[in-house]
Image (tube, rainbow, N blue to C red):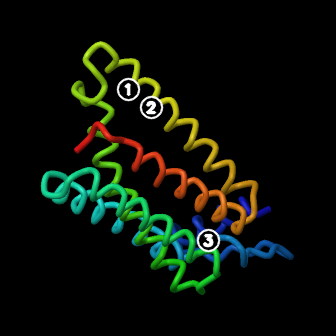
């Protein structure tokens, strides 16, 4: 029924008509201004993170910048475990999205870097990277859909801690 409620909300927003589903509770679905908040948090912070990542890429060394970004992600998701309220959650998720977007600049460059991967292993490494990214995306969406929000935040926090270890173990990039 929730998909029906979301459809109803989208239909109301696009056609400006009142639709009534007798006995249906749509209070848990994303509606109206919540779409705008969600789009602003996701899109705005993604854009800001990409720009900041591109500006900082050549100015700050990998071994300094990437661990700071990774620790920022751990801090954001760690604070989310304490349920900071809706405004706090929006801010923390926005900062986490911006930090992730900043890290994505370096990750994308590493995938295609023949110095880091070696020219003979470049295509293999790129294929493994993209495949693991797709698998991670599918698992993340499945976790968000089927698990409780708290479980999702705990899993994201654990993966962020692992990310800190992975970034600190990369010694080839300076």
Question: Which mark identifies residue 30?
Answer: 3
Decide which of 149, 172 is in the foreground and name it. Answer: 172
Using the rendered view, name the quadrant where residue 32 is placed.
Answer: bottom right
In space, the residues marked 2 and 3 are separated at their CA atoms by: 31 Å
Question: Residue at point 58% right, 71% down?
Answer: 12
Q: Is residue 37 left or right of residue 58?
A: right
Bin the neighbour count of mark 3 within 10 Å (Cα to Cα): few under 14, some 14-19, many 20 and up: some
Q: Are marks 1 and 2 in contact (CB under 8 Å)?
A: yes
Measured along the vertical axis of the image, is residue 110 above or below residue 29? above
Left-right relation of 62 to 158 = left
Residue behind mark 2: 130
The residue at which mark 1 appears reads as: 126
Side of 162 relative to 57 (left or right)? right
- Name the residue: 75% across, 64% down: 148
User: Residue 159: percent from the left, percent from the top?
Assistant: 57, 53
**The N terminus appears in which quarter of the rendering?**
bottom right
Question: Nearest the camera: 112 or 29?
Answer: 112
The spot of residue 95 in percent (x, y) is: 41, 71
- Structural crowding at the residue carrying mark 1, measured as other residues with C-alpha within 10 Å and reported as few (<14), some (14–19) or many (≥20): some
Are discs 1 and 3 less than 8 Å apart at CB?
no
Residue 5: image location, x then y, percent: 71, 67
Question: What is the distance, in whole Å, between disc 1 and disc 3 at their CAs?
Answer: 37 Å
Number of the front mark, 2 or 3: 2
Number of dots carrying numbers: 3
**Residue toward you, 75 or 15:** 75
């Amino acid at each position: 029924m929730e998909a029906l409620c979301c459809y109803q909300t989208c239909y109301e927003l696009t056609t400006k008509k009142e639709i009534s589903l007798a006995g249906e509770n749509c209070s848990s679905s994303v509606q109206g201004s919540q779409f705008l908040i969600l789009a602003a948090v996701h899109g705005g912070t993604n854009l800001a993170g990409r720009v900041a990542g591109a500006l900082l890429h050549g100015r700050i060394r990998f071994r300094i910048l990437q661990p700071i970004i990774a620790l920022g992600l751990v801090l954001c998701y760690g604070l989310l475990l304490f349920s900071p309220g809706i405004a706090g959650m929006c801010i923390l998720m926005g900062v986490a999205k911006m930090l992730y977007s900043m890290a994505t600049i370096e990750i994308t460059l590493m995938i295609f870097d023949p110095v880091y991967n070696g020219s003979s292993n470049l295509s293999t490494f790129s294929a493994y990277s993209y495949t693991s990214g797709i698998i991670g995306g599918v698992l993340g969406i499945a976790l968000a859909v089927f698990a409780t929000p708290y479980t999702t935040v705990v899993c994201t926090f654990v993966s962020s801690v692992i990310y800190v270890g992975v970034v600190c173990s990369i010694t080839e990039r300076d």
